[in-house]
Image: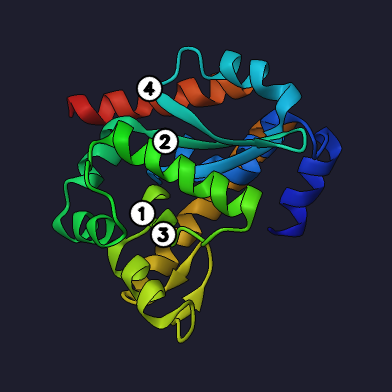
Amino acid sequence: MCREVFENARVIGLETLEIQLALQCAPVIAGLKISNLLIIPSSQEEKLYHIFRNSEISFFRLLWADGKSTFLLYHKEMLEAYFMQWEVRTILKEAGYGNLSLDAVLATFRHRFENCRRNRGEFPHEMGILLGYPSEDVSGFIEHKGRDFLYSGYWKVYGNLQEKLKLFHKYETARSTQVELLACGVFMEDIIDIYQQEWQQKAVI
């Protein structure tokens, strides 16, 4: 995070839900990324529901522990389409997923994620799929056990580095833009609405 973005975020308040949404999930809010984790104090859940009440972005609680809630924020249609890719389905099947419907995968992953966090169980490496990472990078991470990567940014890259670097730059731009808008007094609900209007216009074109 560049200093300017951090300073803007700090002025507003690093612990505010709006800032945490921008810092953790800006690419998802901007429609650039399928999904992302969001970790917030459980006391902010009601406000989260309020912010996304008219949004096309879905969220699914993965864990509640120690006063904090971990959610998966995602674009449902994008994630379902991603699950239809042969490479993605192969990774999920090899990870032990029988039913590959979105609801079934989310339920199974939540169980594994909870077991990992609460009981120090095995880490569910298929998390990269739930986060919409390119399948080549997820399979590369699993094969190389997290080592021998080309670059480590939003995730560890194992192929098409230049393409991923451009994508990471877009993610950073989205985060900077959203923090700046919040610093100017724009509500997160309005920021989400602006992006949704852009998606709808592109869909018409």
Q: Residue at x 56, y 54 (%)?
A: 172
Q: Nearer the viewer, residue 11 or 51?
A: 51
Residue 37 versus residue 188: which sits nearer the camera? 37
SS class, disc 3 = helix
Percent position (x, y) of residue 170?
Answer: 46, 54
Q: Earlier in the sequence, mark 3 or mark 1?
A: 1
Question: Which mark's residue is nearer the viewer, 3 or 4?
Answer: 3
* Type of the residue with mark 4: Gln
Q: Of tags 3 and 1, which is closer to the observer? A: 1
Mark 2 or mark 1, earlier in chain: 2
How far separated are the C-alphas under marks 2 and 1? 12 Å
Whether the residues at callouts 2 and 3 have beta carbons within 8 Å, the answer is: no
Q: Which of the labelled discs sits on residue 74, or is there none?
A: 2
Mark 4 or mark 2: name the one nearer the start of the chain: 2
* Mark 3 → mark 1, Cα distance in angstroms: 17 Å
Label 1 secondary element: helix
Q: Which residue is mark 1?
A: 129
Q: CA distance from mark 4 to mark 2?
A: 18 Å
Question: With 50 as the anchor, is 67 left or right in this view?
Answer: right
As drawn, the label of residue 197 is 4
- For disc 2, the neighbor class at 10 Å (few under 14, some 14 to 19, many from 20) is many
Q: Is residue 193 visible?
A: yes
Sequence order check, earlier mark of 3 and 4: 3
Residue nearest the observer in this picture, 155 or 113: 113
Q: Tell me the mark number nearer the camera, choosing from 4 and 2.
A: 2
Q: Which image quadrant: the N terminus? A: bottom right
Label 4 SS: helix
Q: Residues within 10 Å of mark 4 (few under 14, many from 20)?
A: few
Q: Which residue is farthest bottom?
A: 148
Give, as a three-letter code, the residue at label 2. Answer: Tyr
* 60 with respect to 204 (left or right): right
Q: Residue at x 77, y 50 (%)?
A: 6
